[in-house]
Image (spheres, helix red, strand yellow):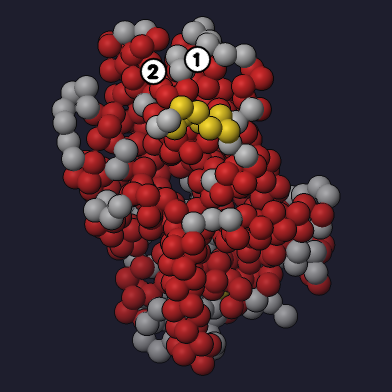
Amino acid sequence: MTDTLPPQAAAPVPGTATDSPKKLARSLGIVGGTLLTLSCVTPASSLFVIVPDLFADLGTYTMMAIAIGSVICIAVAFCYSELGTLVPSAGGEYAMVGTLAGKFTGWLVFIQSLIVVMIVPSIIAMGTADYLEPIIHVDPKIAGAVVMIAATVAGLLDLRANAWITGIFLVLEVIACAVVSFLGFTHTERGASSLVHGVVATDTGTSGVGLAAVLAAMGTALFVTQGFSTAIYLSEELENPRKNVARTVLWTLGLSVAIIVIPVAAITLGAPDLKTLTAGNISDLVIGWSSTGVGTFISLCIALAIINAGIVMVIQNSRVLFASGRDKAWPEPVNRAFGTLNKFSAPWISTLAVGIPGAVLCFVPQDSLINITGVAVAALYLLVAVGALFSRRKHHKHAPAWRQPLWPVLPVLVIVALGYTLTQLDVTALWWTLGITVAASLYWALYLRPRQDSRWIITLPEDERV
């Protein structure tokens, strides 16, 4: 028996009959959904904000780490595509896994996704200051907070309008990545074999990089392409989700990997020396390959890409809180607030609940945020793979949905790979994530579980339930 109910079948809660949340409007086609999803991956922001950390740790092995992470993400994307078409809900991962593997597992997934959605926008936003430097010097924390506030305002607008805005910004960031690729490949300093031989610059010279270092950085490598799952959060607003969710997930992952990996290879081959590569200052590399004017243009494109990413992430993440309110995850006043829509059909209180804390998190050390997010992303993907093992049980087996190849082999491989990866990640980040998960489990045991008839009822849109 499934743990989900269609909206009107959910157990009634006194006093809420007239103010239950409205359903989100289906206003996105595959192009708009792909633009929003690809903008959430924000490949240029990942390249210019996250990848430099990998260059610092892995040197010439950076592309190897991203390639391994991308292979894992392909298997994860297959799981997302099947579950997202089977359970097309704005709740995303928690709705999918909770429907198939039980309420508590769904709750654990929700907590991991909540960690990710609350932290990631702040990490990306803080990178804005570095790329505004040619025009104005701004403290990264202040710049990040301003970007988060601006993204929150944009997130309150019509979704279709936001698709066009983010699409324009996306074109600019793809152009920036293409320019970096062209310049790097036309200024090569080392052969392609260097991409499979890990070397990093140190204070005393150079040092080899082994597989252990690559695995230790896998949380960050997974973070680089994280975002293709946005299609799942938008599934209630995608037209014909049975087809378009899977197409959007897979197209987005393929495009984002290409947009990131090609410039990484170009930078690795074109950096004048290992010290410059390890420093990871891509703007300085561009200036060295071309001119100050080109470097300024690239920097401004990246600043716009980061703003773009902030807008899309706030849109995506507000849908998670909207769905949690509709599914009665909180005390009733909070549920009603998260489910409130404005005249643009945007969940405005949920949007504020994502954007304002995101601005505050910009004042937390970035390295800590990146490490915690890496752990949460790995745990989230692992739990989604667990949910995929239940996707062909009982009536789900014959439900109309996109089906992944090599089931159940791929989900099992993902579980094994990510289970091992978690043991190699930053210990402090593991403890933080574990502490949050334990606290959430206590909330489940003491508040949600005793109220199963009226709390944490995972709903599916009436016309899409299976």
Q: What residue lies at 44% left-to-right and 58% top-to-bottom?
A: 372
Question: Closest to the observer: 161 or 176?
Answer: 176
Is residue 281 something that shows in the picture? yes
The residue lying furthest to the front in this view is: 204
Q: What residue lies at 27% left-to-right and 32% top-to-bottom?
A: 130
Please rate how many residues cluster around mark 1, counting C-alpha atoms within 10 Å: few if below 14, some from 14 to 19, many from 20: many
The picture places residue 87, in percent across and down from the top left corner, at 64, 61
Kind of residue at disc 1:
Gly
The picture places residue 23, in percent across and down from the top left corner, at 47, 62
Q: What residue lies at 16% left-to-right and 28% top-to-bottom?
A: 136
Give the quadrant of the N terminus.
Answer: bottom right
In the picture, the disc for residue 462 is: none
Kindly indicate the quadrant of the structure image that contains residue 106.
bottom right
Q: Are marks 2 and 1 in contact (CB under 8 Å)?
A: yes
Give the SS element for disc 1.
Answer: helix
Residue corresponding to mark 1: 270
Q: In the drawing, does residue 145 fall left or right of residue 43?
A: left
Kind of residue at disc 2:
Leu
Give the quadrant of the C terminus.
Answer: bottom right
In the picture, the disc for residue 285 is: 2
